[in-house]
Image: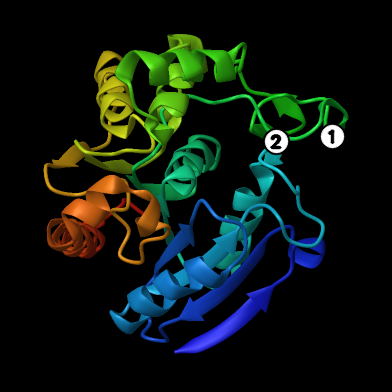
Amino acid sequence: MKKEAYKYNQYGFEAILYDAENGDDRLLIVIQGLKGLDLPEKYAQLFSEKGYSTLAMSYYGGEGQKKNIRAIPLEQFQAAADEMKKRGYKRIGIYGNSKGGGMALLAASVVPDISLVIAASAFGHIMQGTGKPGDDSCMAMVSWRGEDFPYVKKGKLFSDFLKRCMKEKNIRLLYFFDEWDKKGTEENEIPVEKINGDILLLTSTHDESVPAKRDAELLCKRLERDNFSHNYRHINSEIGSHNLGYFPVNNNMLPREKKFPEECQRAREETLNVIIKTLDAWKVIID
């Protein structure tokens, strides 16, 4: 296995390539919700050991990149795909968890070279970006060619969150994102029908962070309405938590992880097996 680093200011994307050096023409881009390459590299190491060349990629927070989740240019995924094609990779996929899962769907919606998307615990709408109003003229969390995406405005989100906590007599992170997500419309859903390849959505009934299951069902209905020409699947876990990724983060903040640690770990192992089987079966027509 050979490693090679790419810097944003030089290549237009920040990543480390884990080349399996086995002649396989598949390349899997791995992104996560957290900034930095530490977590993506763990997955890159895992997948490369299983024979898949992997590009551990960070899309914000690095030198030259956006510091917040606001107007993140999706061009960096096109730049990564272009560079990997130069290296001989013909089939490019992308895998992400949580915020990275939604970002993977968005990246694939504008980069036609991506022929497989695996999104775990992902959001289904494009949200308003974070940061100060003067950070960028684009208000959405992502941009493409300097243009904004339709996005769900925050509005009086914090007061809505407090009302939900009082109603439920509980405080949960899910309430915050659930109230925000419910403001979404068909206009600001992730345009998954534009993806030029297969889609795998992985969710959990007991996600305590984002309404990923509901959003996955919503996106599948969107694909069905559009007569999507590629394969798509939604697999939901009845035992896992929001952390379906093999390397979980902040488990101590999730009540389900504390109450059912063995079940949650089993869900991660089952999810990894599904991902590996999906990669093994990954095929596209090469012109």
Q: Are marks 1 and 2 in contact (CB under 8 Å)?
A: yes
- Amino acid carrying mark 2 in the image: Arg
Kindly state the secondary structure of the residue where label 1 is placed: helix
Kindly state the secondary structure of the residue where label 2 is placed: loop
- Amino acid carrying mark 1 in the image: Asp
Give the quarter of the image for residue 229: top left
Among the two numbered marks 1 and 2 on one chain, the one whose residue lies closer to the N terminus: 2
Find disc 2 in the rendering and name its residue: 70
Label 2 CA crowd tier, 10 Å (few <14, some 14–19, many 20+): many
Residue sitting at x 73%, y 61%: 62
Say whether residue 262 is left or right of residue 161: left
Label 1 CA crowd tier, 10 Å (few <14, some 14–19, many 20+): some
Give the quarter of the image for residue 48: bottom left
Distance of mark 1 from mark 2, alpha carbons? 8 Å
Find disc 1 in the rendering and name its residue: 135
Of residues 237 and 7, the one nearer the viewer is 237
Q: Is residue 204 visible?
A: yes
Q: Is residue 80 above or below residue 137?
A: below
Quadrant where the N terminus is found in the figure? bottom left
Q: Is residue 238 above or below residue 90?
A: above
